[in-house]
Image (spheres, grey):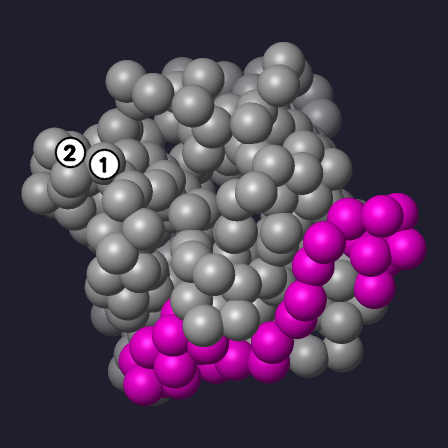
């Protein structure tokens, strides 16, 4: 399937690791010029170098996506140096502590909502302006299966990821006639550093037993969906939320 990304400029946040890195690699393989944005500059640089070694076009920027002014500046820089912005994947995220709502620490709540929800608003706010200037574009926000179902002792993550789905739908309606399609994806249990952070072998086995397919998904399986949604193959798909969770939420 030709996804038609030649000549397109894409930004991927949280591109230094896991799902964001896989999306960046696939976008570049399909011909896009990819801007990798991550708070971890070294990680983003590593992925960008790997893409360039394989003949792809990419550059990297260190950015904290919770800083709205920095996001605005980065989007402006992309417009000036790359000649526009056509595709965006808002993916940067962090995991939270595991506590019941009554015991959930306030500072953890604010930090998690900042990175996983507020940043998606900041990114879209400025990406949309740049895309309108170029006549249109496509955005995918990376939510989670926890945008559809809840995980007890993860109230902040569940709330943030549900919020990303709502934000996606509202913005998609607003820009539906202006040439910008906006969708969200909901990865389930995927093999990434973030999903492994809190897990010992016993809890990994418990999680695996809960998976209808008996395995984790791969970052590439998420990237394939994201790239399809960004492409013209998905030209009538906007304002929707697409799970890639191996039937976990179908339970
Ligand atoms: P996932 O399972 O979603 O792929 P990872 O932990 O592998 O999770 O990747 C999340 C990425 O988001 C990391 O590269 C991390 O550095 C990045 N990230 C986290 N917080 C921020 C932030 N505030 N600004 C930019 N990037 C961030």
At x 43%, y 58%, the residue is 84
- Of 225 and 48, which appears nearest the observer? 48
The residue tagged with tag 2: helix, strand or loop?
Answer: loop
Whole-percent x, y for residue 200 in the image: 75, 55
Whole-percent x, y for residue 96 in the image: 46, 67
Q: How many marks?
A: 2
Q: Nearer the viewer, mark 1 or mark 2?
A: 1
The residue tagged with tag 1: helix, strand or loop?
Answer: loop
Q: CA distance from mark 1 to mark 2?
A: 6 Å
Figure quadrant of the N terminus: top right
* Disc 2 packing (10 Å; few <14; some 14–19; many ≥20): some
Is residue 69 in view from this perspective? yes
At x 51%, y 34%, the residue is 226
Figure quadrant of the C terminus: top left
Question: On the picture, is 100 further left or further right than 192?
Answer: left
Question: On the picture, is 216 further left or further right than 234?
Answer: right
Q: Confirm or reject: label 2 Cβ below 8 Å from ligand 1.
A: no
Is residue 96 in view from this perspective? no
At x 39%, y 81%, the residue is 73
In the figure, 216 relative to 94: above or below? above
Asked whether the residues under the numbered discs 1 and 2 touch, taking CB atoms below 8 Å apart as contact, a structural biologist would say no
- Magenta region: which residues? 49-77
- Which mark, residue 176? 2
* Disc 1 packing (10 Å; few <14; some 14–19; many ≥20): some
In the figure, 45 relative to 244: above or below? below
Magenta span has 50?
yes
Q: Which residue is mark 1?
A: 179
At x 52%, y 44%, the residue is 8
The quarter holding residue 168 reads top left
Magenta span has 73?
yes
Question: On the picture, is 10 further left or further right than 155?
Answer: right
């Amino acid at each position: 399937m030709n996804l038609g990304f030649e000549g397109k400029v894409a930004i991927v946040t949280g591109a230094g690791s896991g799902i964001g890195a896989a999306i960046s690699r696939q976008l570049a393989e399909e011909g896009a010029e990819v801007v990798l944005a991550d708070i971890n500059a070294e990680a983003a640089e590593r992925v960008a170098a790997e893409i360039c070694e394989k003949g792809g076009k990419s550059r990297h920027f260190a950015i904290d996506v919770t800083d709205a002014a920095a996001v605005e500046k980065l989007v402006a820089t992309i417009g000036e140096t790359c000649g526009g912005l056509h595709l965006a994947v808002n993916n940067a995220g962090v995991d939270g502590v595991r506590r019941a709502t009554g015991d959930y620490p306030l500072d953890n709540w604010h930090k998690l909502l900042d990175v996983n929800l507020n940043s998606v608003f900041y990114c879209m706010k400025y990406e949309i302006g740049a895309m309108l200037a170029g006549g249109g574009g496509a955005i995918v926000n990376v939510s989670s299966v926890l945008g559809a179902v809840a995980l007890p002792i993860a109230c902040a993550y569940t709330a943030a990821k549900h919020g990303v789905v709502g934000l996606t739908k509202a913005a998609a309606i607003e820009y539906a006639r202006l040439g910008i399609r906006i969708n969200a994806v909901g990865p389930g249990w995927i093999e990434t550093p973030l999903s492994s952070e809190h897990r010992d072998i016993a809890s990994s086995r418990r999680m695996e037993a809960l998976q209808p397919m008996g395995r984790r998904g791969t970052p590439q399986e998420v990237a394939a969906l994201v790239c399809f949604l960004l492409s013209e193959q998905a030209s009538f798909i906007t304002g929707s939320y697409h799970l890639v969770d191996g039937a976990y939420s179908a339970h």
